Amino acid sequence: MKTAINLLPPRLRRERMLRRRGFQWCLVLCGVFAAVWGARWYKLREYDALSQQLEAVSREGRPAQVMLREITEMRQQIERLQHHEIVARELDQRRQILALLGLIASAASDSDGRLRITNLQATDLQATHTESERGGSQETNVGAVTLSGVSLDSQTVAAFHDELINSGLFSDVKLIKSNERKESGLAMYDYEVRCEL
């Protein structure tokens, strides 16, 4: 049963209905925009919170990163030092032979070209001395340098031998051989000298 009769003309009724529908749709759109804005605001707050947490974690991890960098640099320095140590040991082991070569070259150059070294053989340059615990006896490995070559006369060989003795670097210098031979009408002397350290 109708309780009211709408006496308005159809045109006004249509306009009124359109206004009502427009108002309803405006409310719906405002609700949608509000929901989208709320979701966006919530995401921005969440992003800010995550950014702050990330910054705090990075601040906490910065000392660890510095320490890791320092450890890496220290390892590289240790590797360089180990390489330098290997080179220093190598040079220390070869220092004795370099001194020997310098001394022998100096002694040979004093002959003014009358003596030539054709062969040099070095054995056990790192001489060792060991003692047994019971009897106290010593086991010695003596280093030695054997020189051989050719000279124009025996006096030059003797002077070379004396200069090696006077150097003080060798404990014993022995003239193993000094043989005369003829070559193109000239007397040549083949010699061999053994120097013990």
Image (cartoon, rainbow, N blue to C red):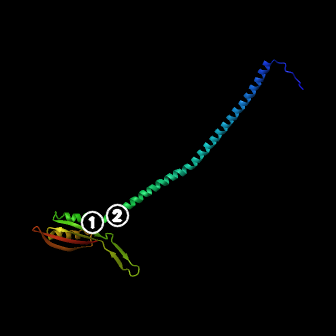
- Amino acid bearing label 2: Asp
- Amino acid bearing label 1: Leu
Callout 2 secondary element: helix
Relative to 48, residue 160 above or below:
below
Q: Position of residue 152 (x, y in %)?
A: 14, 67
Q: Which mark is residue 92?
A: 2
Tag 1 and tag 2, C-beta contact below 8 Å: no
> Residue 27's image quarter?
top right
Residue 158 in sight in this render: no
Callout 1 secondary element: helix
122 on left or right of 52: left
197 on left or right of 22: left
> Which residue lies at the image location 44% right of the left edge and 55% below the top edge?
77
Q: Earlier in the sequence, mark 1 or mark 2?
A: 2
Relative to 111, residue 37 above or below:
above
17 on left or right of 134: right
Please rate how many residues cluster around mark 2, counting C-alpha atoms within 10 Å: few if below 14, some from 14 to 19, many from 20: few
Q: Position of residue 172 (x, y in %)?
A: 25, 73
Mark 1, residue position: 100
The quadrant of the rendering that contains the C terminus is bottom left
User: How many badges with numbers are in the image?
Assistant: 2
> Which residue lies at the image location 23% right of the left edge and 64% below the top edge?
105
Q: Position of residue 114 (x, y in %)?
A: 15, 65
Please rate how many residues cluster around mark 1, counting C-alpha atoms within 10 Å: few if below 14, some from 14 to 19, many from 20: some
> Residue 186's image quarter?
bottom left
State the residue in front, 53 or 185.
185
The quadrant of the rendering that contains the N terminus is top right
130 on left or right of 57: left
> Which residue lies at the image location 59% right of the left edge and 48% below the top edge?
57
